[in-house]
Amino acid sequence: MGKNIAIDGPAGAGKSTIAKSLAKKLGYIYVDTGAMYRAMALYMLRKGISADDTAGIESACTEADVSIVYADGEQQVILNGENVNGLIRTEEVGNMASASSVNPKVREKMTELQRKLASEADVVMDGRDIGTFVLPNADVKIYLTASIEERARRRALEYEKKGMPADIEQIAKDIAERDYRDMHREHAPLRQAEDATLVDTSDMSIEEVEARLMELCGAQKNGGKSDFFA
Ligand code: DC
């Protein structure tokens, strides 16, 4: 079993930015579990499977092979042999990922892959159910959140940077809906694990969040290294 750091939280809380930089600093592998659910969702959208088509979603679980490789230290998601990294960061795919991830078969398939990755390497893994369900024995658990307004503002900025249109009010509405669905689903809903530390990033800079997380990982001592991470 590798060393495992679990970072959970709602959409747009800054998990992936922070988890990626934390992994780099610690020399761990970053695992973005949302990207795996997004790849499954992309498969479904391409097949015309709708969010309420349980049979279609379950057959997608046997037809779609999702795996992870790393290129230049960046996670790449492979869907049936195709690198789909550039195709999964849209609101449409995100919303379908949120809707289809309520299905226990989808969760079972993704959980299996995530646990395998965490058993083979030291990982910083981010998602919704990592500390509560996927890696209940993770060495460090963090619940990262921010207000809906701030999360919508950050998402809109991300889209603008990529030259994509961004309607901040629509994004806030989608985020609120997604929060509700992710938190109220029956299987492995989004919630803070009892032993996770809450970090509200609404009024924090990226540098402040990074410093706080390094501290929580016990890695501030000895100039970035600690016994835990030695
Ligand atoms: O983090 P993200 O926006 O890329 O995730 C997209 C959706 O995938 C999210 O709304 C719910 C689902 N998801 C999940 O159910 N469990 C995870 N560990 C990660 C994501």
Image: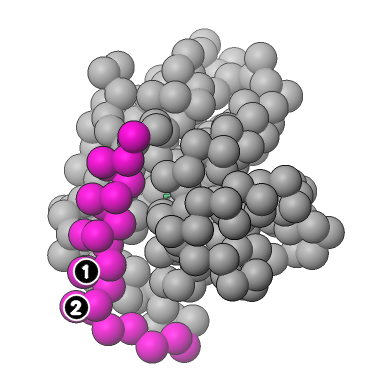
Dot 1 lies on which element?
Answer: helix
Residue 173 falls in image quadrant: bottom left
Residue occupying the point 59% across, 57% down: 56
Where does the image place residue 216, in percent across and percent down from the top left?
35, 25
Magenta-colored segment: predominant secondary structure: helix
Query: Up-down: is 80 above or below 104?
Result: below
* Residue 175 belongs to the span the image colors magenta: yes
Residue 172 has which mark?
A: 1
Q: Would you say the beta carbon of the disc 2 residue lies within 8 angstroms of ligand 1?
A: no
**Depth order, front residue of 73/115:** 115
| Alpha carbons under labels 2 and 1: distance apart | 5 Å
Q: What residue type is labelled 1?
A: Ala
Where is residue 127? Give x, y as percent: 45, 42
Which quadrant of the figure contains the C terminus? Answer: top right
> Within 10 Å of the Cα at label 2, are there few (<14), some (14-19), or many (20+) other Cα atoms?
few
Marker count (numbered): 2
Q: Residue 72 placed where, x, y %? A: 75, 55
The segment highlighted magenta reads 163-186
Q: Do the residues labelled 2 and 1 touch (CB within 8 Å)?
A: yes
